[in-house]
Amino acid sequence: MTGTMTFAGLDVHARSTHAAAIDVLTGELRWARFGAGGEEVIAWLRGLPQPVYACYEAGPTGFALYRAAVEAGVRVEVIAPSKTPRAPGDRIKSDRKDAELLARLLLAGQLKAVSVPSREVEAARYLCRAREQVRSDLMRCRHRVSKLLLLQGRVYPERTTWTRPHRQWLARQRFEEPVTELAFLDTLAAVDGLVARKQALDERLSRLAQEGEWWPTVARLRCFRGIDTLTAFVLCLEIGDFHRFQRPGQLASWLGLVPSLDQSGESRRQGAITKTGSSYARRLLVEASWHYLRRPAIGATVANRQQGQPAHVLQIAWRAQPRLHRLYGRLRARRKPGNVSTVAVARELACFLWAAATAE
């Protein structure tokens, strides 16, 4: 970068940080190793020939070092590790080599920075992901209940489970062995506890979605079929600023909804989707896409969510329904598997959401 005297790469771990810095003027390469925390790292960066441009890869240590460096006046970028170029023939890996590689790639301009969320957005993400973990735990706990009953030769006669009649049927189950009944009641109590936790988190997230700066975008996304408050809120938090994507295809690519490509010479083969970006947002989009199997219509629920929204946003939301419904029909006529068709619809749905969120 023009004017930068020193490029630094940081390999950050929970208990240690390895650093490497390249002085552009002299070509000198420096190394350092630090313990846990970021104070020593920032002090070392400030002692290098200024100005300094440093980076480290996104990971479990989060953005604490980035924010501390920004407050200290040191420019630091958080790099997407999946985009870091690595030589396929390099079989020796160490923290020191990784730090040097980051410094050299930063100097060459070969790294891709991630979008660092604000503290408020990051805190809201924690709550949304806590709700997702509770949902996943609840699903597994329900499976344990049904499989325990299956081991005893008991199967619920109806097709729909975890309804009120099913819950009443579960309450009537009795076992000859007291230990078996104790195991059953304990698993069932775990299900009830997770249901209560999920309901409490849903209520808190619904209030939070309407209180923050993200509500205007959430309200626009709620105009689409299959996307209500919680889904729209999670998409806003996981994607961040929709305006950072110049084209809708960039958002679909960031979400990992585009097919992989293997091209060499005259050979060209498309494979499975790349699955980059937020898996949470990608799953929600795929789930919402199933709603477009039905014929285009604006029901009472969707109409209620659309009240007070700009006319051009409502037009975008309506155009999505016939287009995505026709896409489903074309893919099913070509005998495409259901999951392939749904992912294709999710890709186009992401593009419509980008249009609605960025429309002036």
Image: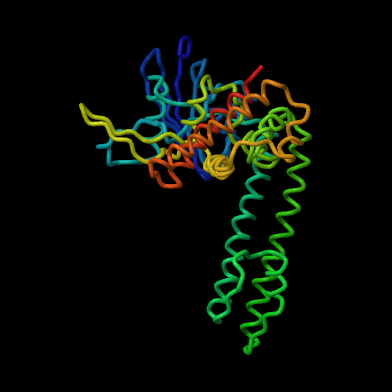
The number of callouts visible is: 0
Q: Residue at x 61, y 73 (%)?
A: 156
Q: Quadrant of residue 298?
A: top right
Specify whether 286 is left or right of 213.
left
Q: Residue at x 63, y 89 (%)?
A: 176
The answer to whether 242 is drawn above or below residue 161 in the figure is above
Q: Residue at x 38, y 40 (%)?
A: 334
* x, y percent for residue 324: 53, 34
Q: Residue at x 67, y 65 (%)?
A: 191
Specify whether 44 is left or right of 268.
right
Instruction: In this rendered view, identify the residue nearer to me: 119 or 332.
Output: 332
Instruction: In this rendered view, identify the residue nearer to me: 179 or 318.
Output: 318
Instruction: Check the picture and name the quadrant holding the N terminus.
Output: top left
The answer to whether 307 is drawn above or below residue 123 in the figure is above
* x, y percent for residue 158: 61, 69
Image colouring = rainbow
Specify whether 318 is left or right of 344.
right
* x, y percent for residue 177: 62, 88
